[in-house]
Image (spheres, grey):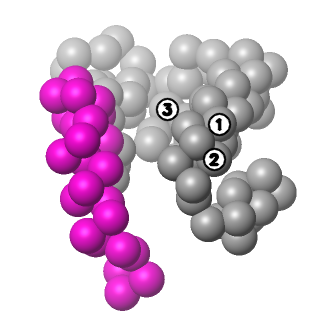
Amino acid sequence: MEHIDTQSLGTVIKKSRVHNRASLSKLIHRWIPTNAFLHKQQRASTPECPRCMKEHETATHTLQCQDKEAITARSMILYEALTKLSKMDTCPLILATLEDK
C-alpha cells in the first residue's frame, strides 16, 4: 500500500462522475457485483461466470477469464484507459508498463 499515490487517486476519484466514483471505490475494495458475490447474498442463482461457465465469477476472475468475449472486453477497456492516460500527460514509464500487458 505504501506504493499507492493516494493523493493522485483521491484527485481522480473526486474528478470522476458520481457513478464512476462508486464503481472505482467498489473495484478498489473488490466489492463488485460478481455472481459469486451476488450468490452469497442469494441474489444470483449461481456463482458461475456467465461467460466461461467454468469458474466462480469473482473480482479476480473477471480480470483473468479466458473467454474470448471477456478478453476482447478487457483489451478495449485497457485501450480506452491508455488513451485517456496519454491525454493526461501520464508518465511515459507508466504508459509503457501498461502497454506491455
Mark whose residue sits in front, 2 or 3: 2
Determine whether, in the image, residue 80 is placed left or right of residue 27: right
State yes or no: residue 40 in magenta: no
Residue tagged by mark 1? 83
CA separation in Å, label 1 and label 2 = 5 Å
Q: Which residue in the protein does label 2 denote?
A: 86
| Residue 17, horizontal then vertical, whole percent | 23, 28
Q: Which residue is mark 3?
A: 57
Quarter where residue 66 is shown:
top right
Where is residue 54 shown, x and y percent of the image? 66, 28
Q: Residues within 10 Å of mark 3 (few under 14, many from 20)?
A: many
Q: Amino acid at mark 2?
A: Ser
In this view, 3 is above or below 70: below
The type of residue carrying mark 3 is Glu
Task: Looking at the picture, tell me which residue is in the foreground, 4 or 84.
Answer: 84
Q: Secondary structure at mark 2?
A: helix
Split into 4 quadrants, where in the image is the N terminus? bottom left
- Counting residues from the N terminus, which is met first, the one under dot 2 or under dot 3? 3
Boundaries of the magenta span: 1-26
Image coords of residue 15 (percent x, y):
24, 41
Q: Quadrant of residue 6?
A: bottom left
